[in-house]
Amino acid sequence: MALSSSIINQIIQQEILLDDLSDDDLADFCQTANLAYRSGNPIISDQEYDFTYLPALKQRLPKHALFQSIEPEGQGFSEEKVLLPEVMLSTDKAYSWEEISKWIERLEKSAVEIDLDLSLIQIKATPKLDGFAGFDDGERLYTRGDGKKGSDITRVFDRGLQVYNDSGRGQGAGEIVVKKSYFEAYLSQDFEYPRNFQASLIKEKALDEKAQQAVNDKAALFVPFVQLPTWSGSIGELRTQFEKVVNEILSAVDFDVDGVVFEVTNEDLKTQMGANRKFHRWQIAFKENKDKAQVKVLSVTPQVGRTGKITPVAELEPTLLSGATIVRATGHHYGLVKEQGLGVGSVIELTRSGLVIPKINQVLKPAPVQIPEQCPSCGETLEWESDFLMCLNHVNCPAQVMGKMEYFFKILANNDGFGIATIEKLYEHGIRKTSQIYALNADDLSKMGFGEKTSVNLINQLKRSSSEQIEDWRFLAAFGVARMGMGNCENLLKSYSINEIFDLDLEQISAIDGFAELTAQMIVSGLNSIKLEFDLLSRYRFNLELTPLQKDLPDFTHGLSGKKIIFTGKMSGSREEMKKHAKSIGIQVASSVSAKTDYLVIGEKVGQKKIESAQKFNVEILKEEDYLALIK
């Protein structure tokens, strides 16, 4: 069940501390904080979210839906969602120069793969605006929504909102922002944060007097990303001038900025690097928090994860760091506890920079350590697997059983209510498998102590989770088999259907590109362990979108088979549907023009930049009707 408002307030007031939160409660709080931020009513500071709660969630649940797909904007209004003219991905984040260096190394590796001279790689840096994201196609302005679908908020232009630099409509992605100087002078008494004000601009209700005045004064604006001031240079220049570039870009505009976005400008390299489901690999945002402290360790407590891994959590002397009181930090694994002497009385260097926050950088003064021998959840004897201390009682360990059920609903990401609080209550009443949850009815839940309305809502959410269409690879990943995250599940299901995979042997899986023998062994064993549960859940006829099998793709005879194509402009129908259809008939769909592009298919109101890029690379341009004629 979702966190109550009282629990949320206790977390905000730090009456409940980060490390006292279960994985599910932490996830629920992050989602609540994220939606509150996106709706313009943040409940915690950006710094706390970016450098404390979200990184802690990434450490505990790196495959949580927040990190696998674009989180939806919390618009706070209920208009019907429509497909965006272009998919608006999120931006990957880095919190140190070391992470930026690794990103640069990936650029260089990709450049070598396409024979691009490393000295020709160009990078640009722009401010990362802290506003309200949208997409302007020249006719309508959309919220970013979930990256694929958003809401039409063109009304903000009807109310007089102007485009930054008086540069005109139709420049694509950007953000609604308010000038910092104006906000502080005229709006700070009425709005707690600029985000509150920015969100108020898009509401359906009429603007209040002060908001309308800000629009009239051109203090509130839509800023297309292409209009932002930039720094451009080579990789070498970025390496030698990194701090200078960051400092200059952070102060380049009179808007709230929460980082610097670095991206490659070479079209060939962008195409080579591509994107995953969440972000473009050729782009990264840098955020920084440098605070450190020396802290004494009071105790080390073991925690049990879903897979049986025992994580040491250091209980610390309360320490103020970056505006928050830190009392706990992860010790990562017990191999490090032994190696570094992380014990009672040890002194550590604690930081809040990086993806794992708060993070133990190093043990400055070691102390004798205590290694647990029994699982704190089930009491079974623990065993070492490399540096990791493990509970191998995977079937009956309460923490693991509940963790697996919670994980299933979390990965499906199409239901509400089945957080750890609900799962714990179900466990208390004998529920041990996800399939048992789907077999329940409202009366069963009421007898377990759930309220009448809650019971009905939970059953409706179960029905929703099976009736709403989800990808077959997501459904498979929800079972939590080792080495079978969503990416590997999708790759596996490109070679074999979801009903065939349980009959595969080691040799067949090893033969799939990207699956090493050790991974294949773990997958064969893992699939065998979930077969019964898979069959039981399959009775509920989940609405699965099946991954097309590569072996079943026909040999297409149309002239565009195997060609790389880009769609741009306003089409007669949905552009996303055009892309989906093109892929289904053997066409490679790309997002940016390069020397490897074969055709640029254009609709109405095409950006000049795309046309110029196509001409630069001698890419043939097709009108929509000509394209449709070719594929018939």
Image (spheres, grey):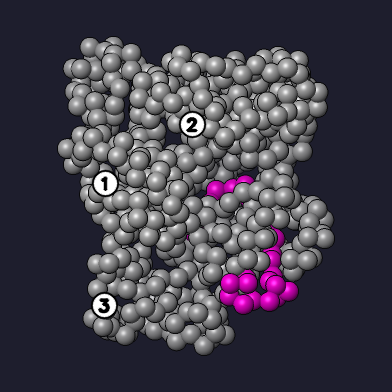
Residue 450 placement (x, y as % from top left): 29, 15
Q: Which is in the foreground here, disc 1 or disc 3?
A: 1
Q: Amino acid at mark 2?
A: Ala
Q: In the image, what residue type sits under mark 3? A: Asp
Task: Establish if 151 lies above or below 612.
Answer: above
Give coordinates of residue 580: x percent, y percent: 33, 65
The residue nearer to you, when weighing 18 against 483, is 483
- Say few, some or many: other residues with alpha carbon within 10 Å of mark 3 (under 14 / 14 to 19 / 20 or more): few
Q: Earlier in the sequence, mark 1 or mark 2?
A: 2
Q: Which of label 1 and label 2 is nearer to you?
A: 1
Read off the residue under disc 2.
Answer: 27
Image disc number at residue 17: none
Residue 183 lies in magenta, yes or no? no
**Badge number at residue 555:** 3
Distance in Å between CA atoms under marks 1 and 3: 29 Å
The one of 463 and 169 positioned closer to us in this rendering: 463
First in sequence, mark 3 or 2: give its number.
2
Whether residue 544 can be seen here: no
The stretch of residues the image draws in magenta is 111-135
Count of residue discs? 3
Q: Nearer the viewer, mark 3 or mark 2?
A: 3
Q: Are the residues tagged 3 and 2 within 8 Å (C-beta)?
A: no
Q: Residue at x 70, y 29 (%)?
A: 339
Q: Is residue 112 magenta?
A: yes
Q: Quadrant of the N terminus?
A: top left
Left or right of 467? Residue 217 is right
- Return the x and y of residue 484 as percentages of the image width and height: 40, 45
Rendered view: 485 above or below 629? above
Q: What secondary structure is found at the residue carrying circle 1? A: helix
Q: Amino acid at mark 1?
A: Phe
Q: CA distance from mark 3 to mark 2?
A: 45 Å
Using a 10 Å C-alpha cutoff, classify the residue at mark 2 as few (fewer than 14 neighbours), some (14 to 19) or many (20 or more): many
